[in-house]
Each structure stands twice: as C-alpha cells, then as structure tokens.
C-alpha cells in the first residue's frame, strides 16, 4: 500500500492512526518521512576525542549542516565511537554529557576586560585585547629582562611574567605556545602536569 | 604509561594503588574487567577508601594516605626475602656493596609488622597482597600497576612511583604485555603537553634547558648525551645533539647557525626551576607583574586558596584564555562565603579571552598510552572565540611588530622566530604538526651509501633516526617525529586491525616513540631473543633475517643480535634499569618512607628518634608555609582529595547533565567518626585545616574505616574536589582552601592527597 502524504492525512483523519496502519502491514514510510525527517539523515558525522581524562575515548559528533561554506554547523549529538579500540563505543558519565559542555551557557563568547578596582567585565575587541596585552608584556619584559647575571654570564631570562599552559589543548596549540613563550625568555612556565 | 589501555587485558594481576580507575578513568578501567573476564586476572586495590575500583577487587587492603613507600617497601622486602624475584644482572651478587645487597639491607627494615605500624594495613591483608603480587615473578604471569595522582600528589610522590617501578623490575614485569608502570594521566592532553616540554626547565621531547652555570655549548650537549657505560650498549641519548639542533632549526631557522652554537644565547638559562609553587610564592611576595592562564584554573587547582588569591591580587595584569568562565578569571569578584574579597581593593587588570573547545578545532591529543590521536572540527565556536594558536599568534605578531618598530630588551629571538605560516595570524594545525614531525632542510643521503638520496630538501622526515646535528634537519619535537610523514597524517589512521589478538592495533593513530606500543619491549624476550612467554609474543630475534621482528615495533636497535649483549633499557648508558639512582633523586639512591608534612601521628616510625626525618627532608618549604601547617592536636583527621565519576575537575560543574547527577558539594566520613562527632548523613559539616574551611554535606559511609597506626586510631576524611563559585551546579567551596603549600621534593607537585583537618557540625 502506497500512500501520498495527502492521502495519508485523509486516512488518518478517517479514524485510522499511523501506527495501526503499520500494525496492519501498511507502512507509509515515505509519507511519514515527508512529515518529519530524521535529523540523523541530514547530519554530518565528525570523529573527535573526549577532552576529559587521558583514556582518549573516540567520540562521534553529529552536526546539522554539511560543513559547506556559510552553512552553520550545529552539533546536536555526541556518542562513543564504536570502532575505537579502547572505548569501543562506550562513554562514562563525563563523556556522555559532552554535548552540554559544547553548549554550556558558561562558554565565553567575547574578549572582555576587568579594569583595576572594577566590579564588572567590559566587552572589548580582539584587536584591543591583543594590543593592550602586548603592550603590558613588552613594558614588563623591557623593564625586567635579565641579560646577564651577577657573574656577568649571559642568561637572557625574564622572570616577572609567567604562563600556565593548558592540559586539554592540542599538541599543535601546545607546540606553538612553547615556541612563543621561550622566544621571550620566560622561565615561569608550567602546565597542568606540574600539579 | 609504559604500556597502554587495551594492553591491560593481557595482565594476570592488576594492582591499582594511588588511583581509582573505575571512577576517574571508567572506559579505561573496562580493560581491567576484560582481563578479569577473559584472562582470569586478579585485581588488587590498596586505598584509604573502599572505592568503586575496590568494589570489583579480588583483594582490597586499606592503607593510610601518604604511606605507600612503606607498603611497597614491604613488598620489596617480601619479594627479596622469599626469593620471588625475576631479574638478576650481576651473576655473583656477593659483594656486600653491590646494589643487590644494599637494596636487600635497605628494605629488610620494611617488615610486615612495620608496614602495619605505618600504613595501618592489617598484617594479614598486607601479606595477602604481597603474595598475590609475588605470584607474577614467573615468566608466564604478568602484573600491571595502574596509578594516578594518588601517588603523584605527595611530598614523596616521585619516590613512591620509583618504589613501584622497583617492584615491577624485581618481578620482571617491565616491557611485557599486561605489565608495566602505568600512570593514568589526569587530563586528555597532559601527556602531550609534557611531551612537548611545557614546563619551566624543559624543552620538547624531554630535553632540558641549560642552567646558568652551563656556559659552554659543547659541554651542555655532552652532559645530556652520555656515551655507553658498558660495552655494546646503545645509550640512545647520545644522539641528543641531533634532537637539540633540529629543534633550534625548527624555532629559529636561518638564525640558528653552527657559528652561534645554534642560537644557544636565545635559550633562557635557569638559576632554579620556576615551578608553579615557586612562581606563586614570588607572586605572593609581589615580585611578579603579569600572568597567563591558558585553559587552567589556578585559583581552584593550586594549594592554599587564600595564598593564591592574595598572590593574584598583587599582579598588574592577568590574562585568561579559556572556553569557560573560570573562578580564576573572577578571583577579584565577591561571591559571598565562597570568595569573600573586595573588588575595589584589587588592582589587577584581568583580560578574559574566549577559546574554542575540542569540538571546534582540528588537532591531535596524546592519551595516557602515548597515542597521538588526530581529531576533527565539527562546528564553529560560539561568538568570537578563537583557537589557542590564533591567540598566541595574535599576541606574538603584535609583540614582534612593537620590537621591530621600537626595539627593546634582547629582541633577537622574537624577531628571528621562524614564522613562515601561510596565514601568519592563524598557523594551521597541519602546519604545526608537520613542524613538530620535522623535515629535511637539505638533501639527505643514506649513511651507508652516500650516493643514495633518502630525503629531498623540504620533505617530511620518516622519524627521529633521520635527524642530524649539522643543521640540515628541523624538528620541533623529536619523539613525535613520524607522526606526519610524506605518507600523510599517521595520527589520523583509524585501522582497527589487531592480527595478533594482543590489542596492539599498530594501525590506529600513532604512538610515540616510532609507533611503539609497549616501551622496553625487548625485555619481553629472553637474552637469546625468544619471547619469555609464548602466549604473549611481542618481539623476537629472527636469525635468518638478522633482525628483530614483532607484533609490536621493537623498542631496540633493529639489527643488534642477542649475542651482542645489548640491554633492553636503551636510553640508559648502562643498558639496564636502575635500582640505585645515583644523583637522580633529591632524597638519595633508595626510596624511604617519610610522613606527610601534616602527619596524624607526628612521628616517623622508621626514624622515631630523629625529628628532622619526620617528613621529607629534601622537600622545599617556603617561609610562612611551614607556619601554616597544622598539627594533629588541632586537626586530628587525615584528609585526602579526589574526583567523582560524574565530574571532571572544575569543568563539568558548567555542564548541565553532570550538574544534575552530582549537584552539591559533599565530604565522606566513616561511620565510626560520624558516631564520635554526632554527625548524621545529610548534616552540613564544616571541614577546616590550618588554612581555612569549607562547608559541605556529610556522606556517612562504610567505605572509610578507621585504621590503627603506630598505636593510634586514624580517621580519614574524603573530600571530592569539583565545586566552586562559577557553574550550573550548586555553588560550593574551593577544596584547595584546605590544602598545604608544599610539593614533592623532586617535581614540586603539591601534596593534595595527605593533610590534616578537623570536622564539626556546621
């Protein structure tokens, strides 16, 4: 039995529900799909790795949109990667909640500054943030850089500004962070591994 | 991890101590249950609390927090006394000053009675554990050890882990499938960040910065490139110069030349290590100007919150880079009892920069098993958030511009930093991954046949064996070399094939070094090159082909025949592992039990008459912090902090589903202590140390029992650490309000796991 969407509504209005039609063996699949299509059918699957502990469970993120330019990708589901040799599709209570992490209302969206003594944040542009921070960094580095120690040995170190690196950022982020930080001569530099 | 997650299934005995994998690493713990189900493995858990790991154990033994060296020392004594050991290198072992006899004498003091006295572990329980562990001293049985911050975060943390390594060496469980000493790292890429050397004294790939006394470049390299101490040994670090020069070429390009010692002056020289405790001590003294926190929440994560908060308040500027609104970013904001500060009095300028999270970027992270797994971006970040590389580039390019225009202190390394990215303001993950993999800067020819071209200039290298110290190769992190070669991105591989059914999956992602899955795997074969255990075939010598073959990539010189006598510990100049660590550990060559700095018994039963040896004499304590330690008179209970299975650190309190499953801060106390204090389950209690207090709901539990230690009853208080004043869960107190500002004597990792508190009804 093939029904068009229009016919289906007619039948349904005539007292038969979709499910009883199915029960009778008349499955109006195509017609139902037209009424409401599955998100899954239009989703893009992307492989990723859980960012919490160090087991490194494989995850699959489902997003709307095909990642084409200007198409807004919205992640609507995250589950364990069934092919991953360690977690084999499973996730723990932390990993199972990842979607709510991505969409947490406490995600930061804009650069902000809190001025000395102030009780509030003020939104600023990236350019203002970068420029102000770079000026502060240069001012301190130029004032406190130690080119030679008391014995006259070249030490080229800078101790008055420090940097704590992340524990969940990628290798690539870590690599370039290290490269930039050391080029400044900084020694007050650690990551979460210290604690 | 010397081994990796899936490999746990190959174990016969699993010891979980100093960790709680069932709750903190649930999907990794599944491989413990797999070993139990398929391999009849026995699980042993030693912990102050009866954790969910303990709930599945065949054998559980309680222990007082901070006494693991005494326990493991007792195990070593048991193994030696019962001749339950596997590895002997000196065939005579008779000289009274040989390491073996020194070891025996040292640990003979750790009798089962002494273990009971220090650890509070009943003697019969301890002996059951020791017997179970000892059962793996035969070639056909293997034990893995899984530990985590429960070992690391003590003033004796490094030596605890070293004692465990000694147990595994004695039993012959290193290099074996199902064996090893396995650190279950706390965060998803803490392994990678460590590998990349983002620590005060390190450079990428476990290379080290020069000290200020190291003024001679050649001596600096020579010290780190030891020649073999015994004939026929590999001593692989002797290639150090190749790794170092290739790093300097990756960072400084043409500015690093032989004539300027590969830009040796560009590297800052250490007068001491600036670990986070040292840095916050300086900040507290008002000697720091600025600070950056990238994906890190020090107000919550460092000990003695009052000190950390006072230190941050003395900064001129603080820069936060994070996907979430952290407590640190609002340390200046009054949040009532949870953060009682006056913003008007805090003059720190705070910048808060939004970053992407995992789902919004490409890149690789390294799991505990040393697997570099590439991941892909699935969506755009919210608002104007940027990736960390974009933010670092944004800051760097402005700084470089200012130094170019106005000059300033030693601008050379800034002006000459290699920055040939297609989009300078947004270096791509692909470019950066290729940079740490390394490439040829000039045509490379075969060492044995100089007419044979191996790599053309500009091509990506196949691995670290191709690195040179003449400036003709560049490589940002030598141990990652091989991750992205001319064949493509090895970290993106997703081949699930496991032809040997031993879980090594060599085609899944890339493991450092050189895609080896189990470190020291040469030790899985006997001296003649035959696997010790036919059931666990890992590597073997193939005489016909004159090379090592395996189900894993051999961690060895591929063509070194067994009769050449090369040892499996190829990074050590002696070719063997070390029981006696000469000049490596600040306490001395052998581990010794010391009490936590806040000790519930006030004495070290190993040295009852030496007040200087109560706690670790090699640990560093700053002025003021010693005075802030409490004693058992005022704070009688041994406290330890830990994670819950439903939460990850201070992140998931921002996550609705996790906030629903564990909404409110609580502490765990045993029934006996609760009865003594008149506390009922659900009562609000105040837990205080000499540094401050928290208030939380009391969970009264059978999982924590009082222990008899040195003639005294010691109660433990368990303190989960996940709450704060920002998030979607109920706000709570920062647990590290309570913890002491002292670290391990070697790493300066804070002693979060052993301190003293008092508990009263709030």
Image: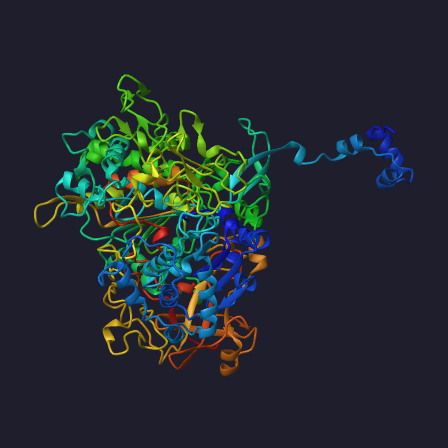
* B12 left or right of B483 in image: right
Left or right for A26, reference B227: right
Which percent across, then down, holds residue B172? 40, 53
Q: Is residue B178 left or right of residue B598?
A: right
Tell me if I can see residue B592 in this picture: no
Residue B592 location, quadrant: bottom left
The percent coordinates of residue B664 (x first, y second) are 54, 64
Name the colour scheme: rainbow
Q: As drawn, which residue projects farthest toward the left?
A: A151
In front of the other: B517 or A168? B517
Quarter of the image for residue B595 reads bottom left
Q: Is residue B81 above or below residue A40?
A: below
Res. B515 image quadrant: top left
Point 21% across, 46% down: residue: A158
B703 or A50, nearer to the observer: B703
Query: Does residue A134 lie above or below B27 as drawn?
Result: above
Residue B224 in view, yes or no:
yes
x, y percentage for residue B584?
A: 24, 54
How many numbered marks does the figure carry? 0
Considering every residue shown, the one lying at the far front of the view is: B92
Q: Residue at x 53, y 26 (%)?
A: A69
Outermost residue, top side: B451
- In the depicted view, which residue is nearer to us: B86 or B588? B86
**Residue B52 x/y as whole percent:** 54, 62
């Amino acid at each position: 039995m093939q029904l068009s969407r229009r016919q289906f509504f007619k039948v349904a209005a005539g007292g038969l529900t979709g499910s009883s039609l199915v029960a009778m063996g008349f499955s109006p699949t195509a017609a139902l799909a037209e009424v409401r299509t599955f998100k899954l059918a239009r989703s893009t699957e992307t492989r990723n790795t859980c960012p919490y502990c160090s087991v490194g469970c494989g995850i699959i993120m489902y997003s709307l949109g095909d990642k084409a330019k200007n198409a807004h990708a919205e992640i609507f589901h995250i589950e364990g990667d069934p092919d991953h040799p360690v977690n084999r599709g499973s996730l723990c209570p932390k990993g199972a909640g990842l979607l709510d992490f991505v969409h947490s209302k406490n995600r930061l969206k804009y650069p902000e500054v809190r001025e000395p003594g102030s009780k509030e944040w003020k939104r600023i542009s990236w350019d203002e943030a970068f420029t102000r921070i770079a000026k502060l960094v240069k001012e301190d580095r130029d004032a406190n850089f130690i080119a030679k120690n008391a014995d006259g040995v070249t030490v080229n170190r800078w101790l008055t500004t420090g940097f704590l690196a992340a524990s969940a950022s990628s290798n690539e982020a870590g690599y370039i962070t290290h490269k930039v930080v050391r080029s400044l001569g900084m020694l007050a530099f650690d990551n979460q591994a210290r604690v | 991890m010397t081994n990796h997650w899936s490999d746990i299934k190959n174990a016969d005995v699993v010891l979980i101590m100093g960790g709680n994998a069932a709750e903190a690493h649930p999907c990794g713990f599944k491989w413990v249950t797999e070993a139990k189900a398929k391999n009849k493995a026995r699980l042993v858990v030693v912990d102050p609390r009866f954790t969910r790991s303990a709930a599945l154990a065949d054998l559980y033994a309680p222990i007082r927090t901070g006494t693991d060296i005494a326990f493991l020392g007792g195990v070593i004594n048991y193994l030696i006394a019962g001749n339950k050991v596997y590895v002997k290198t000196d065939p005579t072992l008779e000289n009274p000053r040989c390491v073996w006899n020194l070891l025996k004498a040292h640990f003979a003091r750790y009798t089962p009675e002494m273990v009971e006295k220090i650890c509070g572990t009943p003697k019969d329980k301890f002996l059951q554990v020791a017997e179970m562990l000892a059962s793996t001293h035969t070639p056909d049985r293997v034990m893995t050890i899984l530990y985590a911050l429960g070992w690391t975060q003590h003033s004796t943390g490094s030596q605890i882990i070293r004692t465990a390594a000694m147990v595994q060496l004695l039993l012959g469980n290193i290099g074996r499938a199902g064996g090893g000493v396995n650190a279950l790292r706390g965060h998803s890429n803490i392994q990678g960040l460590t590998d990349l050397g983002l620590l005060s004294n390190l450079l990428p790939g476990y290379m080290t910065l020069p000290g200020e006394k190291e003024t001679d470049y050649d001596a600096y390299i020579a010290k780190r490139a030891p020649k073999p101490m015994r004939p026929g040994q590999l001593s692989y670090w002797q290639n150090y110069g190749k790794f170092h020069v290739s790093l300097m070429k990756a960072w400084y390009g043409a500015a690093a030349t032989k004539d300027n010692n590969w830009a040796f002056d560009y590297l800052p020289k250490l007068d001491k290590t600036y670990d986070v405790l040292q840095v916050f001590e300086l900040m507290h003294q008002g000697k720091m100007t600025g600070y950056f926190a990238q994906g890190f929440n020090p107000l919550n994560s460092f000990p003695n919150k009052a000190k950390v908060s006072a230190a941050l308040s003395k900064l001129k500027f603080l820069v936060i880079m994070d996907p979430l609104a952290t407590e640190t970013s609002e340390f200046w904001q009054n949040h009532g009892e949870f953060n009682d500060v006056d913003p008007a009095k805090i003059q720190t300028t705070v910048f808060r920069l939004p970053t992407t999270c995992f789902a919004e970027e490409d890149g690789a992270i390294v799991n505990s098993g040393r697997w570099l797994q590439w991941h892909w971006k699935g969506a755009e970040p919210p608002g104007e958030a940027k990736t960390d590389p974009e933010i670092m580039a944004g800051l760097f390019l402005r700084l470089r511009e200012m130094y170019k225009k106005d000059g300033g202190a030693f601008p050379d390394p800034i002006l000459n930093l290699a920055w040939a990215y297609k989009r300078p303001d947004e270096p791509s993950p692909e470019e950066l991954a290729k940079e740490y993999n390394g490439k040829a800067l000039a045509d490379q020819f075969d060492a044995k046949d100089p007419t044979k071209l191996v790599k053309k200039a500009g091509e990506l290298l196949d691995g670290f064996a191709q690195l040179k110290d003449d400036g003709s190769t560049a490589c940002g992190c030598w141990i990652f070399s091989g991750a992205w070669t001319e064949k493509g991105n090895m970290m993106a591989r997703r081949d699930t094939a496991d032809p040997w059914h031993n879980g090594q999956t060599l085609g899944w992602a890339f493991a450092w070094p050189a895609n080896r899955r189990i470190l020291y795997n040469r030790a899985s074969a006997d001296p003649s090159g035959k696997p010790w255990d036919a059931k666990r075939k890992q590597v073997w010598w193939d005489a016909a082909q004159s090379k090592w073959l395996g189900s894993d990539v051999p961690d060895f010189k591929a063509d070194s025949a067994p009769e050449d006598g090369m040892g499996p510990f190829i990074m050590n100049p002696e070719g063997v592992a070390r029981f006696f660590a000469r000049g490596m550990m600040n306490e001395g060559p052998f581990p010794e039990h010391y009490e936590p700095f806040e000790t519930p018994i006030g004495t070290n039963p190993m040295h009852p008459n030496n007040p200087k040896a109560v706690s670790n004499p090699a640990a560093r304590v700053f002025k003021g912090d010693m005075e802030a330690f409490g004693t058992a008179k005022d704070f009688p209970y041994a406290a330890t902090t830990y994670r819950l299975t439903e939460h990850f650190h201070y992140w998931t309190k921002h996550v609705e589903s996790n906030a629903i499953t564990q909404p409110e801060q609580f502490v765990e106390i045993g029934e006996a202590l609760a009865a003594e204090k008149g506390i009922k389950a659900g009562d609000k209690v105040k837990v205080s140390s000499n540094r401050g207090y928290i208030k939380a709901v009391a969970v009264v539990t059978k999982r924590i029992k009082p222990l008899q230690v040195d003639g005294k009853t010691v109660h433990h208080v368990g303190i989960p650490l996940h709450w704060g004043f920002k998030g979607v869960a109920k706000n709570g107190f920062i647990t590290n309000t309570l913890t002491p500002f002292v670290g391990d004597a070697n790493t300066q990792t804070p002693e979060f796991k052993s301190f003293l508190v008092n508990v009263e009804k709030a």
